[in-house]
Image (spheres, rainbow, N blue to C red):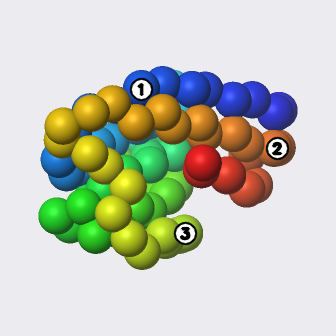
Amino acid sequence: SNGMVTFDLKASTDAHVALGPSSVTYGGGRSIDDHYEIVLGGWGNTQSVVRYESGGLNEMKHLGNVLNSIKFRKFRISWQYITSFTLS
């Protein structure tokens, strides 16, 4: 499905956003993450990434500073069929 979330954020580094349910438990009690993780301003505010699960592989990457520790910045995350993300 399509969707969008907007928010204001004031941080110096490592803001994490999870999109989707927190986890899914399968037979045998095995639980895995069932969400996308978006890291804004990770690695000392040098890059932002999208992952298919918390702590997973970096599937998409944006290099550059995106966070500000002094004033709020507005972020919008939108998706289409959960196959692509747009961060602005």
Considering depth in this image, is 20 or 66 the residue closer to the camera? 66
Q: Could you say which quadrant of the image residue 41 lies in?
A: bottom left
- Vertical side of 40 occupied by 69: above or below: above
Q: Secondary structure at mark 3?
A: strand
Residue at which label 3 appears? 60
- Label 2 crowd (10 A; few <14 / some 14-19 / many >=20): few
- Mark 1 touches mark 3? (CB < 8 Å): no
Q: Residue at x 40, y 36 (%)?
A: 73
- Label 1 crowd (10 A; few <14 / some 14-19 / many >=20): few
Measure the C-alpha gap from mark 2 to mark 1.
Answer: 24 Å
Q: What amino acid is found at the position of numbered circle 3 in the picture? A: Met
Q: Residue at x 49, y 58 (%)?
A: 50
Q: Mark 1 or mark 2, which is nearer the start of the sequence?
A: 1
Measure the C-alpha gap from mark 3 to mark 2.
Answer: 16 Å
Residue 8, label in figure: 1
Q: Mark 3 or mark 1, which is nearer the start of the sequence?
A: 1
Considering depth in this image, is 40 or 26 the residue closer to the camera? 40
In this rendering, which labeled residue sits more in front, label 1 or label 3? Answer: 1
Q: Residue at x 51, y 37 (%)?
A: 75
Can residue 57 be seen here? The reply is no
Q: Secondary structure at mark 2?
A: loop
In this rendering, which labeled residue sits more in front, label 2 or label 1? Answer: 1
Considering depth in this image, is 85 or 44 the residue closer to the camera? 44
Q: Position of residue 39 (x, y in %)?
A: 37, 52
In this rendering, which labeled residue sits more in front, label 3 or label 2? Answer: 3
Residue at which label 2 appears? 81
Q: Secondary structure at mark 1?
A: strand
Q: Residue at x 73, y 42 (%)?
A: 79
